[in-house]
Every structure is written in C-alpha cells, then in structure tokens.
Amino acid sequence: MTSAPAVDDIVRSEYEHGFTTEIASETFPPGLDDGVVRAISRRKGEPEFMTEWRLKAYRHWLTMTEPNWAAVAYPKIDFQSISYFSAPKRPEDMPKSLDEIDPVLLETYQKLGIPLEEQKALAGIAVDAVFDSVSVATTFRKSLAEAGVIFCSISEAVHDYPDLIKQYLGSVVPHTDNYYAGLNAAVFSDGTFVYVPKGVRCPMELSTYFRINARNTGQFERTLIVAEAGSYVSYLEGCTAPQRDENQLHAAVVELIVMEDAEIKYSTVQNWYPGDAQGKGGIYNFVTKRGDCRGARSKISWTQVETGSAITWKYPSCLLRGEGSVGEFYSVAVTKGRQQADTGTKMIHIGKDTRSTIVSKGISANQGRQTYRGLVRIGQRADGARNHTQCDSLLIGDCCTANTVPYIEVRNPSANMEHEATTSKISDDQLFYCRSRGLTAEDAVSMIVNGFCKEVFNELPMEFAVEAQKLLSISLEGAVG
Amino acid sequence: MTDLTANGFGSWLVDSVSHADWLDDQRRLSRAQIGEQGIPTSKQEDWRYTSLKGLLEQCFTPVDETITALAPDDLEDILIPGLDSHRIVLVNGRYAPDLSMPGEIPKGVRFDSLRTLLDTDPDAVRDHLNRPLSALRAGVEDEPQPLFLALNTAGFDDGLVVRLERAAMLERPIELIHLSVGMDEPRVAQPRHLIILGEGAQAILIERYVSLGDSIYCTNAVLDISLGCDAILRHERIQMESANAFHLTGLYLNQDAGSHYQGVNIGLGARWSRTDLVTDFRGEHARCELQGLYLAGDRQFMDYHLDVTHSVPRCTSRENFKGILYGRGRAVFDGNVVVARHAQKSDAAMSNRNLMLSESAEVDTKPQLDIHADDVKCSHGTTVGQLEPEMLFYLRSRGISAALARRMLCLGFAGEIIQTLSSELLREHVSGQVGQRLESAPLD
C-alpha cells in the first residue's frame, strides 16, 4: 500500500511551535562547580539552609555515575558545557498582574495557543507560567488564597514557607535517588509549589506551562505538591519548546505528597521539540516524578501524553504506603522520526489493600524507539494488594521499535497482579473498513489511533484532552504506509 | 592465562583429554571467557533476581570416574513402569551402557555417547561443537558465551548425540535419564547433548533428571538442538533433582523452515535451579511451543529465562509457564520475545501465571517484548494470585477437607501443562509427583 502524498506531507511536517522569543535574559556562563551552585542560590536570595541543601546534593552528585540502562542512545552529555541559570530580565520588579508582563512573552504564549487571559475567563485555570527558569506570571492567586491553597513558585515558597519546604522538599525524591535527581537538587532554578490544606477541595485546576527558551540552557524544574488530609487538587503541566539546533537538557523533579483521604491528579502534555528528521536538536527529557501516598485511602493519578522530546526518560511512580491507597498511571507516548522514549511507571505496594492501575499506550512510527519499563512491587505486608497493568503498542512503519520491559515482584500471597501487553499495527481490515465508508486514510488512522488512546484521554481534564487529541493528530495522522 | 579461581569456578575445570585441535581451541577460548567475565551479580539484567551465593559456597569438582557399581535393579524406583522407550542413562553426566536400553533403533537414526564419538570420530560432531555463539543464539556478534555455557564448553566430557537422517521417524520416545548418585564430595556434571533432526524427521525426547539419595551436587547441562526443515520434535523435560542439588540447563534451539518444536518443562526438584531456553528461527513458517510448570517449595529457588528470537518472517511462538509457590519458595520468570527487523507476520504469545500459597513465597516475573517490525502479533500476559476463596468454599461445602480442596485446585491449575505431555504414563507420573509435593507442603 502506498501512502497518499498528503499523508507524507504531514509526516514531514515541521514542528509547529518552533520559534524563538527575543527577550533579554541573564544567563550564567556554562559550567558547574561549588561556586555556580552558591551563585544560583545567592542569585535567588535563598536562605542559608537552601544553599547548604543544594551543596550537599551537588557533592553527592559528583560521586554518582550517569545511568545507562535505559534503551536510549545519545551522545554523551558534557555537563560542564551547560549553563545552569537563565532568568528573564527585571526579576526585581516581578509583575503583579498580566498588564505588567512583557508583551513579547504574552505573544509567545498566544502563538502556543495558550491565551492566558482567555483561559482565565473561559477555563477558570490559574496559570503559573514558567518561562525559562523564573516564574513571571501567576494568576488567580487571590481566589486560591481565599481557599487557603498555596500556589506559587518554589523560590517564593522558600522565602514565604520555609518550614513547609524544609519538611517536604526532597522527602519523596532525595538527592541521592538518581543522577538527574541529584543534579536537579543542586541546581534547580525554579518550579511550582502547591499546598492544599486539610479538607480543601482546590476550587480550580492548577496549571503550569513550561517552556524552554534561552539557548543552551538546561532547565531544572522542581515541583512540590502537598495535599493534606481530605483535600483534592488537579494539576496540569504542559510544555512546548522553540526549535533549536543544540540538544537541551531538561532534568525535572516532581514530588507529590498525599495524606489521608486526599487526592492529587497530575496531568502532563509534553510536546517539546523532538529534533528534526535526522534527530538533531531535540530536547533531552530526563525526569524523576514520584508520589508518596502517606495516608490511608489517599490517591495519586498520573496521566501523561508524551509526544515531544528527542529522548524521554521518565517513570512517574507511586509509593503506596497508606492502607487502601490508590495509584494510577495513564500514559500515551508517541515516538516518530528518531525520537526515543523509555518511559513507564513504578507502583510500590507497601500498605494493605493498596490498588494500582497502569494503562500505557505506546505509538511508534518512522524510526521511533519506544520502551515501556515498569515495576510493580508488592511487598510482604501489602495484604490484598491489587494491580492491573495493560500496555499496548501500536507500530506504524517497519523501522520502528517497541519494547515492553515490565518488572513484577510479588511477595504476598493475597496479592492479585495482572499484566497484559499487546503489540500490533493498524490492521488493513480496519483501514479498509473506514475507507470503504468514505474516510480518507489520514482520518481513518487518526480515528483508530484516537480510539487506541481513548482510555488515557478519558482521564485527562477536558481542555487537555482536546489539546492531546490535536497533538496526536498532528504527530501521526497518515503516518501509515 | 586468566586465573579461573578468581571467579569461584576454578574447581569446575580440569585439563581435559585432547580429542581434536579445534576442540582444544574452543575450550581454551571458553576458559578465557570465564576468566574475563567474573561472577555475575544482581547488577546484570540476566542475574537481577538470581543469586549465585549458594552455588559458590560449594566447591564442586568435575566427575572424574564412571560409576559402574549400579545394576539395572537400582533403577527400579526411578523408571516409569510400562513406559516403552529407547532408554539412555547417564550416571553423574556419563553414559552408562549397562543401565541403558536403547532397544531396536530404526534405520536413519543414531544414538551415540559424545565421549565415544570424540574418541573415535570427533569430526562427526565438529560442525555442532565448533561454532560461534552466534550460531546458537541470534543477535550476538563476537559476544562471549554466557558463563554457564562457557563452563560447559570448557568442561563437558560426555553427553548424548542423537542424529536423525532426512525423513527418519522414531515411533517410541527417547528417554534420556540423568541419574545423579551421591559422592564423597560435591561434584559437578556438565553433559553436552546434541539433538540433530534432519529434514522431515520426527522424534519424541523425554529428558528426566533424577537422583539416588539427597546429596549435594550440581548439574550444568547444555542441549544443542537443531531441527531441519519440517522436522518435528516433542521434548519433555522433567527435572526432579535431589532436594540439595543445584541444576542448570542451557537449551539452545535452532529451527529451520516449517519445523515444529513442542517443549514441556516440568521443574519440581533441586534447591536452586536455573533454566535458559534460547530459541531462534532460521526459516519461515516454523513453530515453537514452550510450556512450563514449576513448583517451588520451601527454600527452593527456580529461575526460568526464555529468549525467543523471531529473526525471520512468518514464524509462530507460544510460551506458557505456570508456577506454584509455597513455603519459602521463590521463582523467577524472565521471558523475552524479540522480533527482528523484517521479521514480518511474526506471531508470539507469552503467558506466565503464578499461584502463591504462602506468606513467605516470592515471585519475580519479567515478560518482555522487543519488537522491531510492524506487521506482527505479539502479546504477553502475567498474573500472580492465590486460590479463589469461593472455589475453596464450594469444595468444602461438599465435605472436602481444606487441605484436599487446596490440593485439588492446585492440581487443576497445574493440569493445563501436565496435560500437554505426550504419554498417559508420564502425565500420571508427574501428577503423582506434584500431588505428593503439595501434600507434604505447609500450605497455611
């Protein structure tokens, strides 16, 4: 079967969001040592305890080695050639409202289809937009404050809520956890802090848009979300990045802490620049995401749609400690061109009657390389633990790769663990059926792929689900041949 | 030369008799590879859940004498009454002609002791023994042999060579009995078997590992199986080593176009065992079935590694392993299905189901798919669970004791695999053994 020319056009379509915003930024020269770590801390006016915390992490990081077990290939990263701090100018007069924000910046968001003010009105989403490393816009602070919800940048939180930071930062992902988490702890530039007090249902969905901008700057975000007993919060994270020639390193850390009867829903749409057709210039996305269900009946739900980045290395995990706590992971990952993704989840069942669900949908096209790597561990005391895992791969084209590497460790006889995986392509029958009813090849593929991912999209908040479907259509429509 | 003792396996090897230059070269190469590898650790993916500590605590030395003191009567408890077979017996890894009863062998079929062949006509097996790892295992270029294959290559001194010519057919099964007999000190036997079926040949091979007494010993067997075009081999392996034994098997299977391999692996014995099943398709439309049942009782450890490679289009593989764990039993299942680029229309399905009956049992399972072609049908499924309380209740409400009810349900679970054995006698034998082990198991 030969593909229609229109189909090929779409496959070759250039990255839509590739543009660079000209904005003066104050950037450190490349390199990393004790001095740079101190300088970052000083630059952000951090209290002594944070400087020490960073230095401890940095010194430990020096003793660590880069992990190489993931099924991804990339040239060795020279950590000394990366600049570790970049902030939009005028940090001293942080804007209080949207009017004060640099119009160039606003325009950037508009190009990305994220009109802040419209969103404010239509979707009721508070946006803590991260442009490079420092938060420059925070909306809806007031109505959140009335509910008692703290939603601010990590830098602000370090100043305003040092006790909370001391108590929770690094308590789920310690700096000793892995190489990139260690690096992040030492040099993290900014990120988001959310604290939902006891019994509060966050009145709106919180959202941060990440965007990597300044040339050759690694972005080291740090997100910390604490949900106290009986509270609920839904957090959306979405990313796009401008076109670049050099690879950009992104090593974020996300920590979630959930107390008794509380719930955090964390959704991600990741659409960073994947590199050109030769795989040149895409983002390296090495992320550590982990949630800790500390209280009984607490719940964490990770939903991710990963369509961008040259390399994705990401395993959002749940530590299910509390009795009856629940972990969920819903993922759609797309690799096309020369994209590589090694992603999955870890569900560590520690408490009694803990439950976890994993639904992973991988779509691999062109020369895309994709690995689902997951761990389900049911500990000796996790009586009545249940897990259901489903990972499906869809292959489009005969040069792509799909791997499934699940690790399942069960040490409790009352546990119930089920794992299923399938690998298939879009069958000719399905295509023929759709086309015989007058659908074009692209529409048919888009329909089938969207159907394949439906279980995951259903978990996304509505606005994100629409964006995700659009992204998927752009990435893949008609990639069949 | 590299110091072998450095990695703990030095005692396994002695200078073997020279049969041919090519073989000496192979053995030298293997020794060098052993020395270079060092001891596998849990950092290595293949040994992630498997510790060699217990094995290394023993100082195994190779069997250096042929045991002749046994009489056919001594086999009484071991033989399956009524099983009509071409019986070949190896005692501590060496061919025992006095105990074997090959019977009448049809035209085009040859059974030989590898030791004898090496003495008389080493070049007859040269093609099979003198070849690089890539001939045994797909996807490896210039890689050293895995440790236990290298140990076997460096140290084997006997085994069974079965050769079936084109279209030769064996009506009765070949029964290969590995009998281990206690010695004064811990011994390691490293038999090497070559099973070669020509085009369209058909055979059934029953492989049994048994022991007299419960002494400490180690078996490190390697089977090299080649199936010609359209050949059919049924291969039934029943491992019932002594409760103190260590058992290793490396099974390397190569299948030509249209051939069909049906393997059943029953693991009941040994305190520590590791089985590597490595299969590769060399021609289209071949089919490979690997079935397995393992019963890991108290303090038993069982490890199954499957490497199934679809390197050519239009082949089918089925992997179905079931495990029952009780006491402090531990099992590892690591199944890997690889579909190479261009191996379109591959069809693979892998399943691993485990029944955990006790608090202290543990199972680690890792069913992997590694797919490089798009037009394929691949799936895997894994479950870990316990007996359904409703089923137990149903049986108990009909006056059946809790213990018996559990045993019935376990046997039902195991039955799916046991039923695939070719002979009724064998099915009864295995069912009986499984039942017996479950009866003595502390099930609560």
Image (cartoon, rainbow, N blue to C red):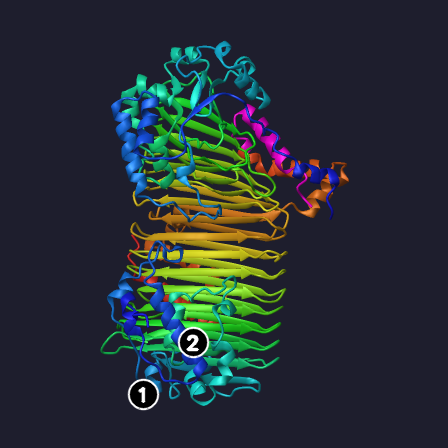
Query: Helix, strand, or loop for circle 1?
Result: loop
Mark yes or no: residue A229 visible: no
Task: Tell whether position A214 is magenta.
Answer: no
The overriding secondary structure of the stretch rendered in magenta is: helix
Q: SS for tag 2?
A: helix
Numbered badge on residue B68: 1
Residue A35, image quadrant = top left
Q: Magenta span covers which residues?
A: A457-481
Q: Could one spot residue A266 in this view of the protein?
A: yes
User: Disc 2 or disc 1, which is closer to the eye?
Assistant: 2
Please name the amino acid that badge 1 sits on.
Thr
**Residue under the image location 43 percent in, 64 percent down:** B276
The chain that hosts pointer 1 is: B
Q: Which amino acid, mark 2?
A: Gln
The answer to which quarter of the image holds residue B285 is: bottom right
Picture layout, residue A188 above or below residue B81? above
Q: Which residue is drawn at 53% across and 81% down?
A: B163
